[in-house]
Image (tube, helix red, strand yellow):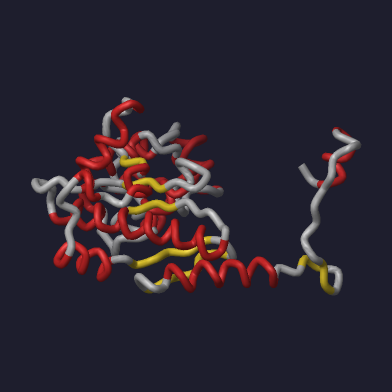
Amino acid sequence: MRGDEAKRVCPGINLVQVPVARGKANLNLYRSAGAEVVAILASKGKCERASIDEVYLDLTDAAKEMLLQAPPDSPEGIFMEATKSNILGLPADASEKEKNVRAWLCQSEADYQDKLLACGAIIVAQLRVRVLEETQFTCSAGIAHNKMLAKLVSGMYKPAQQTVVPSSSVQDLLASLPVKKMKQLGGKLGSSLQDDLGVETIGDLLSFTEEKLQEQYGVNTGKLHIRFDHIIYLPTTI
């Protein structure tokens, strides 16, 4: 609700207003706070600001360095905050969560991409703790092989938690994802997919060929059709 609406429903509500300058919200305080967090994150990789309180961090080099020089090889030696990670695809048994996460983070038989993700999860946990200690701010994170996936899961578990997307979990994640949650499908195109083609999830979208989508929406827009096996993995990102 907007402030006036909230007051009508709850006359005793205390509304907090951001500072105002020249009749507009003055967000300098928030930008400065965000800059403090980014300065810490940037110690481990290149940052790309996405909004006033959101940033992508390329951890590729840092993860490769950890994997080469100090790989996680003992469940007991895993950084504590990293053991609280939410790793998609692991058994949902809460009583065994920490044990399962520790095992996943240091599995020797994992493929190279998942080993990089494990290192990335540990680095992110260390960064989040450092942010909390130095700024008193909490933050949530998504760790994946591209920005789209990282963004999708960053808000899955909040507050102050992190979620990891192993390669093996990508298909299940996207198959059940509401179509309007996908970047570029949240507006009119997403509504059209729902209304004209009955598409509710990305899994539903897969039942249509690229040719069918191009016939319906034109050649360029039809290319938005997603194939799970053709996902291009970009740098490990939070």
Name the residue located 35 percent from the left edge and 72 percent from the top edge.
45
Which of the two residues, 151 or 41, is positioned nearer the viewer here? Answer: 41
Using the rendered image of the protein, determine whether residue 235 is visible from the camera's viewpoint. yes
List x then y, in percent, for residue 146. 32, 58
Quarter of the picture holding the C terminus: bottom left
Q: Residue furthest left?
A: 109
Name the residue located 84 percent from the left edge and 44 percent from the top edge.
14
Write down the quadrant of residue 168 in the picture. Answer: top left
In-image side of 44 versus 15 (left or right) = left
The answer to whether residue 211 is above or below residue 124 is: above
The answer to whether residue 20 is above or below residue 200 is: below
Name the residue located 36 percent from the left edge and 41 percent from the top edge.
86
Q: Residue furthest front?
A: 76
Which of the two residues, 111 or 171, is positioned nearer the viewer here? Answer: 111
List x then y, in percent, for residue 76. 22, 45
List x then y, in percent, for residue 161. 45, 46
In-image side of 236 versus 55 (left or right) = left
Q: Count the marks: how many? A: 0
List x then y, in percent, for residue 204. 36, 34
Which of the two residues, 150 or 109, is positioned nearer the viewer here? Answer: 109
Using the rendered image of the protein, determine whether residue 222 is visible from the camera's viewpoint. no
Quarter of the picture holding the N terminus: top right
Name the residue located 31 percent from the left edge and 41 percent from the top edge.
87
In-image side of 20 versus 202 (left or right) = right
In-image side of 11 versus 214 (left or right) = right
